[in-house]
Image (spheres, grey):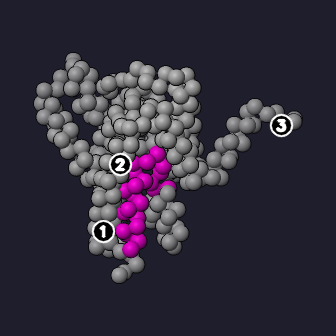
Amino acid sequence: MDWSIVVALVVGTLQGIFEWLPISSEGNLAIALSALGRSPDDAVAFALFLHLGTALSATVYYRHELRDVLELVPAWRPGRAFEGEQALVTFLAAGTLVSGVVGLAAYATLDAVVSSVTGGTLVVLVGVLLVATGLFQLLSGSVEGEVRAKPRGPDAVLVGALQGLAILPGVSRSGVTAGALLLRGYDGPTSFRLSFLLSIPAAVGGGLLAFADTGLGEVTLLAAAVALGAAATVGYATIDALMRLVERVSFWGVCLALGSLAIVGGILVDPDGFLSAVESVVGLFVSPEY
């Protein structure tokens, strides 16, 4: 078997797993492919292309809900944007719009100057906040506190903006979006569901943009098809396993697990950047005179 096919299968499988976890799929695929002798730049570009595979898995997994959303579109009215069932339609539309604007702006103005340091540190920060939230819930005993049932306007803007920033190196899309929803008061299943639904148009756009910009490079059509198939298949299984898990774990447990993975993933992508951030924070409290 051609080695490129083996690599494609490995990369597609990793993309299917990493995409839904609070770790940067691009950053961690770059690490994996670098170990296999491939360049990090090629890994990041191919990871963006593979978002088409995970977008397919999310579309199939949420096919019934997406059908319901499309059926609600003709009845949508501005005055009832966040009322009843229309709230989900508005959240997805507004979140996608904000995500596209922020993502294009970030790519055009910041991609050349923002390295994986910023991305990795951002993911670690989100992870620390989630761990702190989970510990607070656990220690306070208010594990089953009031949770939000449907998305609101500020949630669409916040999550859409964070998803747009996830185009930067080292930023985990699912980590910052699902994490933000958890911190906004949604339970685990709702946070992941909203995050994954919102990811579909962004993933399709990112994958097509990467293909139009760089093409497949040295990757053959067969290898690309194998990688996409692996990403879609494993991505579907990963979503199902993750949703089953969060439905059985208390809110504090979801926060601790998600936060811990985010911290580890952020440090793994950029350990030097994490250490620099820690030194900067410590420097704010420790005088150079000492």
Q: Residue at x 26, y 53 (%)?
A: 56
Do the residues bearing badges 1 and 3 touch, measured as CB atoms within 8 Å?
no
Residue that mark 2 sits on = 241
Q: Is residue 60 above or below residue 162?
A: below
Give the Cα distance between marks 1 and 3: 55 Å
Q: What residue is at 34 percent from the left and 33 percent from the top? A: 190
Assign the magenta stretch its main secondary structure. Answer: helix
Q: Is 218 or 213 nearer to us in this picture?
A: 218
Kindly check if marks 3 and 2 are in contact, taking CB atoms under 8 A apart as contact: no
Q: Could you say which quadrant of the image residue 181 lies in?
A: top left
Q: CA distance from mark 2 to mark 1?
A: 22 Å
Residue hosting label 1: 226
Crowdedness near tag 3: few (<14), some (14–19) or many (≥20) residues, C-alpha within 10 Å: few
- Segment tinted magenta in the rendering: 6-27
Amino acid on which disc 1 is placed: Val
Q: Is residue 214 magenta?
A: no
Q: CA distance from mark 3 to mark 2?
A: 49 Å
